[in-house]
Image (cartoon, rainbow, N blue to C red):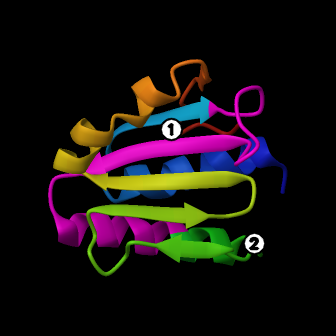
Amino acid sequence: MDTKKLIHVIAEACDDKHAEDIIILDMKEVSLISDYFLICHARNERQTQAIAYAVKETVENQGISIKHIEGYEQARWIVIDTGYVLCHIFHEDERNFYNLERLWGDAARVPLQIGQEG
């Protein structure tokens, strides 16, 4: 699966669990960490974990192994590393505090295509 399809699949999984303010940053020109960041948030820890679980299951069902998951137990900032995409699932308060969108402001935003083939 190519990286653009993977980011779409991850965005769909987040949206299915009612993640809020989903954005995708193209990191290829600004960082060696990952090709893309997907950033979203939830209003409580339980929902944050539900989104993370859905992303993990969806990605693994596509035959892609998760490299690492960090922060699941605390559920304030969960990071799921697929190798090419880092999915950041924040509790709303932490997202406002860390503001990755501003920190990585040089990264181009990728148009979100929820509910479309792409």
Residue 41 appears in the figure: yes
| Residue that extends furthest to the bottom in the rendered view of this protein | 73
Q: Earlier in the sequence, mark 1 or mark 2?
A: 2
Residue 52, image x, y percentages: 42, 68
Q: Left of 1 or right of it: where is 41?
A: left
Position of residue 36 relative to residue 56, above or below, is above
Q: What residue is drawn where x is 77% and y is 75%?
A: 63
Residue 94, image x, y percentages: 24, 49
Position of residue 63 relative to residue 11, above or below, is below
Please say whether residue 52 is one of the residues in the magenta stretch: yes
The Cα atoms of the two marked residues, 1 and 2, are separated by 20 Å
Q: Which residues are magenta?
A: 26-55
Task: Look at the numbered discs 1 and 2 and tell me whether their residues touch, using CB distance below 8 Å.
Answer: no
Residue 113 appears in the figure: no
Kindly identify which numbered label has been placed on residue 59.
none
Please say whether residue 98 is one of the residues in the magenta stretch: no
Which residue in the structure is indicated by mark 2? 64
Q: Left of 84 or right of it: where is 96?
A: left
Label 1 secondary element: loop
Q: Residues within 10 Å of mark 2 (few under 14, many from 20)?
A: some
Q: What residue is drawn where x is 45% and y is 53%?
A: 88
Q: Amino acid at mark 2?
A: Ile
Q: Residues within 10 Å of mark 1 (few under 14, many from 20)?
A: some
Picture quadrant of residue 109: top right
Which residue in the structure is indicated by mark 1? 114
Q: Amino acid at mark 1?
A: Ile
